[in-house]
Image (cartoon, coloured by chain):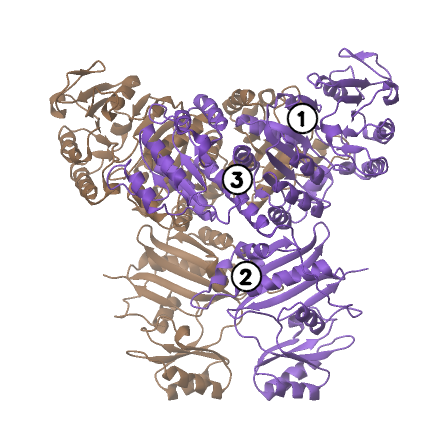
Chain colours: A purple, B brown
């Protein structure tokens, strides 16, 4: 059945609540009570009651006899399949199961979960949960939950999608504490039917929502989520938080029954799709608050102007933004000259502009100059709350701020002043923050979003070139076969000759440029170096013979040969890989080669198909990327050649599903180009 | 003159205020007005006024005729030297200059600053500032500042030392916003006389102060600060924030006239001295709040128990703590069995303990079991604020918390509930935080402090072994001379022979184990490899001759020779260095060798004298420290040999001030031990 959209779940005209109870300690009572403010029709269902909380109670869903959009099941897990079927039979659009006792709790629960999954599939009813806290829409005053805290959340323009019901509530509270409200918050729980991707698609089209907050733990279909994020971020900003930077697998699985998966890959995919990925709930909240007021235009590297009343705060913000690679450009000469009018003579003027204790008028004048500077996309300002000297409300009111550039304003003051001040600033679309670093980090989020938009906008829809490599030979592939495929996709390999015996080897040696490398060629040996199967830097016949002799001694089942190859020149060793990931599908990896890089896990990943800008970002993301610029006198690496290799691997994976995995380790890169010194290709199992 | 302590500055019985003004817009008016709540005697000084704000005004300091402890100079920079001299002449104990116009503003200011520095030195008067916001002691209601915001800070047990006046106020506001108060906040400004070390010593002995917050930008005498931090942290926790992770030098210098210096060295020195070093003002505030209530006992690796009502919050905290290397040990079997009584059957019990929605009694019972578990030093608990289900105030009141272990409690709820809830928790010595990660990070700070205390406590006073190396030869030292010194301090070097001509070289070749290395030996050539002066892996006479020939071709002034050396076995290449730093004095460095490590700046630093535990921490701090444990089958590195080498360099620097710098690059380390493959020693200029 074709799945319907989620309006009947989140904007229902009638709600039935199965398991409605008259006992205040029961979830079925609380859930009904929390519907007090709901404007639609309510049908409690309980065969043993007549009225609860003034509502007429029905004996069954069928007994209602009128159209129902949403059915809330406040009943034990074991009773859920039958009632979910009944909900579908009366043509309800959606159901919500808040309770636990499903896949997260063991084998019995897993079987029940399978059953309700199947019911959703065959009937088309949409299901939120199970094992979630429900949802709340403060704008329409609809609380579908048994947690009273949901009722206190103020309306606003931030939507929360959370795999964990607890986190959906925690984030809502944190937003409220900072003076911001929400349009919708939903806990997804075990994601039997409705998952993050469904929610993102729904909220991307929801006019009340200006920014989407996403908290995900594990994923089953990462590719679907990726595509949804990519669609959504064309319309509005999305900030994402996920877990798994350290090894927390077992604990995580016991929560929502999902595996955590690779943090690095989740974060890379979300970023590639246009999300701003943060590492803490605080950063998630701060970024969302800023985005609910401000979104920068797409820009390759937006320039940020900094204006501070306290130099110390400026230093903390500047240090952080520079570390994050945010562009704080020098001000134009004319801006500096204009600003100088409002500052004492000899005052050092640069970006950040440190104004010291100035009158409000001076501060406003300087801010105006910066807003008009063409090299700046947004302004990060900081001023202690000292209304007798500098009152930010008056400041921005008088500036008629609507006409100018986005501003984040950091401030500090007594708590009683802060709440109203921040609320008034937000009402003028100035994003307020209560510490230097929080202000800076929020600005960093805005900048990342602007860069994401630019990168995605530059290439439009993701394309990939189709590459034909023909049918792969049967059995495992050896290095020479791997390199033949690399040649087809235009990744350079060293000149080499396959030799089946010593006399062929002798001829090959004569033919190739010295020095050469001699390797054992066998699909059965994966780690050639470990078995003594690789002999480098061979410059004379004596060494060459010794190498062949040594290779002959290696025990090796099946066919074997020598691969004689011209030695590559010096360069930077990289690892380029492609993998068909179980969660995200075709994925491309770039890593630094060598023991040190491996120990530090210095890699960057992206989903295929890759755009050139993605490949550029992969290089920039490597911790040791500075080595690409040339190091201690060596010339800079040919970046375009590395980018081309990454794109070629991406295209290969997309157009050939016979390939499960591809490893080029190392890919030698230098100023001239790249050369694949080894190649391992693993075929898909079909 | 012997310097007096700071009591007359911070606990004055009488204050004179020079430049007291009747004009409300002037600093001299504001400063006087802010003394309203001060309990001691006040003497405004202004030759042109009779009374201001009800105070009798004096024509000069001398005209007061009574003892004055503190003189506030609210006058232009140019007038300060004369008045400071006058203050000293009437035997005032201390002075405060808030205004700017000194070293931070150019050459004229620098000269005035030199002059006042000199006055302090010769007269012994203590000076806070110039170029600072002053100080506030909310306990005694003394505000010595012109900033009205200082008057609103509530009293408490946290002291703030800040180089920047603005930051001292910002931090105080942030603490107030979180419901905490302060014992003293002081901005140091240009630190002409009173510096961070003086303040730390003063506050270490201040009974009202339970924790010291330190914000420093640049330092002139890092060693003094280091010693003061070391003394203070024996008595109470100290949390430090400094700047310079990125290149912000020029902007920083324009602030307080100090250079920023190496962030890595500042952070390492502070940590070594026992401080908890954080990276943002938010972390500084959070850690200080926790420390004002809790300090863990010294422990090598304290175990933390985690108890969460919301699994999602548990995951965020767990992920962060594991990433930070905090020890979250498994619970004892008996604890697990006891906890199982309060949870549904089949509930997964581990550490973190995820209890889900439980009654308050169940939560309390489980918490009690964890508090009694001997493997745990402290508990990190998290529960949404849902007073009908779980009221943290009742929870801890009923637990009679004073008897048990330290607890950090993270929570989330509506802002109106949060303030009183957090205040009541703090009153019971439970440290409250409003996000999972903030709770976790505060716990991380407590753990770091416990580890610091343990490390420092284990060795008591820092000692160093005296090493006699005799007088160094005149002129620059060559590699062989460097290695001779290494041998004296028991750092192993390869067996080698210095050869002045080919025939000596021939004999040396015969004598040494093959393969050998041949190097040019000349104090004039610093980079031997770059000029072709290093020939490795020589296994036969032909190669040996070729190497000598090639070395002979290198242009080289003065004396030269060949250094023939036995080749070292394989291993991990490290860099070990010693330097007499201008700010911190003798300093020891450990780094990973190789291009990649250099690009990633993978180094760790400590001040000498080093304790074995410091050296252990240096290894652990390297990003690639996992390579010490053996990598892909290679045996683990002999850590003790690396530690011994670091300690030897430390001892050498401490007992021989003829050495300015020492570089061992590389120090080859493997399972057997270490071998210094090169040595460069630079003598001090005297």
- Name the image quarter holding the C terminus of chain B: bottom left
Residue B444, label in figure = 3
The residue singled out by tag 1 in the image is A136
Residue at 41% in and 41% down = A305
Residue neighbourhood size for the residue with mark 2, other residues' Cα within 10 Å, grouped as few (<14), some (14–19), many (≥20): many
Where is residue A108 drawn, in percent x and y? 83, 37
Q: Chain of mark 1?
A: A
Residue A265, label in figure = none
Question: Is any part of residue B208 visible from this angle?
Answer: no
Mark 1, secondary structure of its residue: strand
Where is residue B599 drawn, in percent x and y? 47, 60
- Residue A683 as seen in the image, left or right of residue B166: right
Where is residue A511 drawn, in percent x and y? 62, 86
Question: Is any part of residue A128 visible from this angle?
Answer: yes
Whole-angstrom CA distance, mark 3 to mark 2, is 28 Å
Where is residue B152 drawn, in percent x and y? 38, 22
The residue singled out by tag 2 in the image is A596
Residue neighbourhood size for the residue with mark 1, other residues' Cα within 10 Å, grouped as few (<14), some (14–19), many (≥20): many
Mark 3, secondary structure of its residue: helix
**Does mark 3 fall on the same chain as mark 1?**
no
Q: Are marks 3 and 2 in contact (CB under 8 Å)?
A: no
Residue neighbourhood size for the residue with mark 3, other residues' Cα within 10 Å, grouped as few (<14), some (14–19), many (≥20): many
């Amino acid at each position: 059945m074709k799945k319907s959209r989620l309006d009947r779940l989140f904007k229902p005209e009638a709600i039935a609540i199965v398991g409605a109870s008259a006992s205040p300690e029961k979830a079925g009572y609380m859930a009904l009570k929390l519907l007090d403010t709901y404007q639609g029709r309510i049908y409690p269902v309980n065969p043993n009651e007549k009225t609860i909380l003034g509502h007429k109670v029905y004996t069954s869903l069928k007994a209602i006899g009128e159209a129902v959009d949403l059915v809330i099941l406040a009943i034990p897990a074991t009773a859920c399949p039958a009632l979910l079927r009944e909900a579908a039979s009366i043509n309800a659009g959606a159901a919500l199961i808040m309770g636990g006792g499903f896949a997260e709790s063991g084998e019995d629960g897993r079987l029940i979960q399978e059953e309700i999954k199947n019911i959703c599939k065959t009937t088309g009813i949409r299901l939120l949960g199970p094992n979630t806290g429900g949802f709340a829409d403060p704008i329409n005053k609809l609380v579908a939950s048994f947690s009273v805290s949901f009722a206190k959340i103020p309306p606003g323009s931030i939507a929360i999608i959370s795999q964990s019901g607890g986190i959906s509530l925690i984030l809502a509270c944190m937003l409220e504490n900072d003076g911001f409200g929400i349009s919708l918050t939903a806990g997804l729980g075990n994601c039997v039917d409705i998952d993050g991707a469904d929610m993102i698609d729904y909220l991307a089209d929801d006019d009340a929502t200006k920014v989407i907050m996403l908290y995900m733990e594990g994923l089953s279909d990462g590719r679907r989520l990726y595509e949804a994020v990519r669609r959504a971020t064309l319309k509005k900003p999305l900030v994402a938080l996920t877990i798994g930077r350290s090894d927390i697998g077992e604990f995580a699985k016991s929560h929502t029954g999902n595996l955590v998966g690779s943090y690095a890959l989740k974060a890379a995919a979300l970023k590639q799709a246009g999300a701003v990925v943060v590492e803490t709930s605080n950063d998630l909240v701060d970024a969302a608050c800023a985005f609910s007021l401000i979104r920068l235009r797409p820009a390759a590297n937006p320039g940020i102007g900094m204006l501070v009343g306290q130099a110390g705060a400026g230093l903390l913000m500047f240090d952080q933004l520079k570390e994050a690679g945010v562009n704080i450009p020098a001000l134009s000469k004319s801006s500096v000259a204009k600003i100088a009018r409002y500052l004492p003579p000899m005052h050092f003027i640069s970006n950040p502009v440190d104004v010291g204790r100035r009158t409000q008028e001076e501060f406003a004048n300087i801010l105006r100059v910066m807003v008009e500077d063409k090299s700046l996309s947004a302004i990060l300002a900081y001023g202690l709350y000292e209304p007798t000297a500098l009152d930010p409300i008056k400041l921005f009111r008088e500036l008629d701020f609507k006409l100018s550039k986005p501003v984040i304003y950091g401030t500090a003051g007594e708590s009683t002043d802060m709440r109203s001040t921040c609320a008034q600033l937000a009402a003028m679309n100035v994003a307020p923050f209560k510490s230097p670093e929080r202000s800076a980090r929020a600005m960093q989020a805005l900048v990342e979003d602007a860069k994401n938009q630019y990168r995605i906008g530059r290439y439009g829809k993701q394309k990939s070139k189709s590459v034909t490599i023909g049918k792969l030979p049967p059995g495992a592939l050896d290095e020479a076969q791997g390199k033949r495929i690399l040649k087809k996709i235009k990744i350079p390999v060293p000149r080499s000759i396959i030799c089946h015996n010593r006399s062929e080897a002798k001829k090959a040696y004569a033919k190739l440029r010295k020095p050469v490398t001699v390797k054992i060629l066998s699909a059965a040996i994966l780690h050639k170096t470990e078995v003594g199967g690789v002999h480098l830097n061979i410059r004379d016949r004596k060494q060459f013979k010794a190498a062949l002799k040594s290779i002959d001694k290696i025990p090796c089942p099946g066919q074997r040969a020598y691969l004689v190859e011209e030695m590559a020149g010096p360069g930077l060793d990289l690892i380029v890989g492609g993998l068909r990931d179980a969660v995200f599908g075709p994925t491309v990896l770039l890593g630094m080669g060598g023991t040190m890089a491996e120990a530090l896990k210095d890699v960057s990943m992206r989903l295929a198909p890759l755009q050139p800008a993605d490949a550029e970002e992969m290089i920039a993301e490597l911790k040791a990327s500075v080595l690409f610029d040339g190091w201690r006198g060596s010339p800079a690496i040919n970046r375009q050649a590395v980018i081309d290799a990454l794109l070629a691997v991406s295209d290969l994976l997309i157009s050939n599903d016979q390939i499960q995995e591809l490893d080029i380790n190392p890919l030698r890169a230098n100023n001239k180009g790249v050369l694949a010194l080894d190649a391992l290709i693993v075929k898909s199992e079909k």
